[in-house]
Amino acid sequence: MKTLSQLYEESKSLFLAVFLVSFLVGATSGALFGVLGATMLNETFGMTLAAIGGHPVASGDQQQASAGTTTDIGAANQSDVVAAVRKLEPAVVSIVISKDVPKVQAAPSPFSFFPDQFFGNLFGQLPQQPAMPPSSSDSGGTQKQEIGGGTGFFVASDGLLVTNKHVVADENADYTVLLNDGRKLPAKVLARDPANDLAVAKVEGSDFPTVTFGDSDKLDLGQTSIAIGNALGEFRNTVSVGVISGLSRSITASGSLFGTEQLSGVIQTDAAINSGNSGGPLANLNGEVIGINTAVAAGGQNIGFAIPSNEVKRVVENVKKNGRIVRPFLGVRYVIIDDTLAQKDQLPVSYGALIVRGQQTTDLAVTPGSPADKAGLKENDIILEVAGTKIDTDHPLSTLLAKYNVGDHVPLKVMSAEETRTVTATLVERK
């Protein structure tokens, strides 16, 4: 007969054996199903960890994204939001950017639920798989590859659509439009705006659903805003809701691939705008487009910016009439004067456009041979008025000049060394 001590030792050994077998089976099964789950998720949604496309970032900071984030708008106007989205959504498209790039080995899967170090601690270090040698067909040459994405929307039933200039900035890339019915159509960029973050493209076909424009000059602070776009380049027609949180903003938008651009008179909203939303519509509760989403401010909570719809409408009509975007050009580099700048630089007025140089030596205050140069404008002059309208943060110079056509004679009230005079500049086409 076995003693209690012997039975205890045998039971302990059996328990440890069962425990180790169960642990090994459980860990292996968990890893297997985790990998299978990741593969299924990847195949189902095409997810990657890196966002494609994106917005320029206001003030040059790193942007923050929050796909699908919404503001609690209450039950009162929830049905209005649903109706607005249903009206607008068919005309919103995703834009895929493709380009010939050098052939390289396929990248490893972005999913890694169990790092090697974790397994190594339990079972000993796992052997590293040798890299697969490149096949003869992969050595050298190029292959077509998706490199980014954005959003756009139809403005005419014949396939005319608008998006951001920075979405279609690469003249050597190919652009494909993904429609809500599953069709993929090649798009041709007709025009890139030389003065704003806007572009017009076209796909072949007819009877495309279109948007209706609202009047962006009649917006009110606090009114509901709805953003729709291809969030993170992965989640098509993502809807986010917020309010109009600012009007007539002037910002400097920048991005690593797009350079820097001054944007004036833009709409500020707290509706979540993410990478890939660029070029998508900002709408009101009537389902009317009131802006085109273009930039976000990092360091803040859902601070986004959209170019007003009235500006977009002018660009569309311009392309329909001229086949390109024709912009009047004055030829000055300037900053808008406000109370802070006037006090800081001890300026004689607290409004107007101060003509200044840029940061680069080539960024001249006045372009040689331009209408401004011919009208006698110089660095440190202050343009006070355009045809009797004061220049200020709500009425920037670029917005006032946009109302004129090439060849128009525009009266400018100018202050030079605290002496005021009126000059006339004849606008030319901006190249």
Image: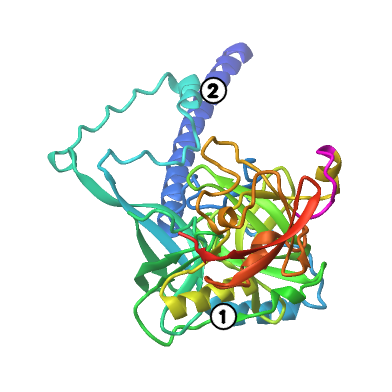
Q: Which residue is mark 2?
A: 16
Q: 326 or 218, which is in the foreground?
A: 326
Three-letter amino acid code of the residue under disc 1? Val
Relative to 36, say whether 389 is above or below: below
Q: Position of residue 290 (x, y in %)?
A: 66, 73
Relative placement, left or right, of 269 versus 67 is right
Q: Secondary structure at mark 2?
A: helix
Relative to 34, say whether 194 is above or below: below
Relative placement, left or right, of 322 versus 374 is left
Q: Position of residue 244 (x, y in %)?
A: 76, 65
- Whether 346 is among the magenta residues is yes
User: What span is colored magenta in the figure?
Assistant: 344-352
Crowdedness near tag 2: few (<14), some (14–19) or many (≥20) residues, C-alpha within 10 Å: few
- Mark 2 and mark 1: span between their CA atoms? 69 Å
Q: Position of residue 131 (x, y in %)?
A: 27, 29
Query: Residue 32 falls in which quadrant of the image?
Result: top left
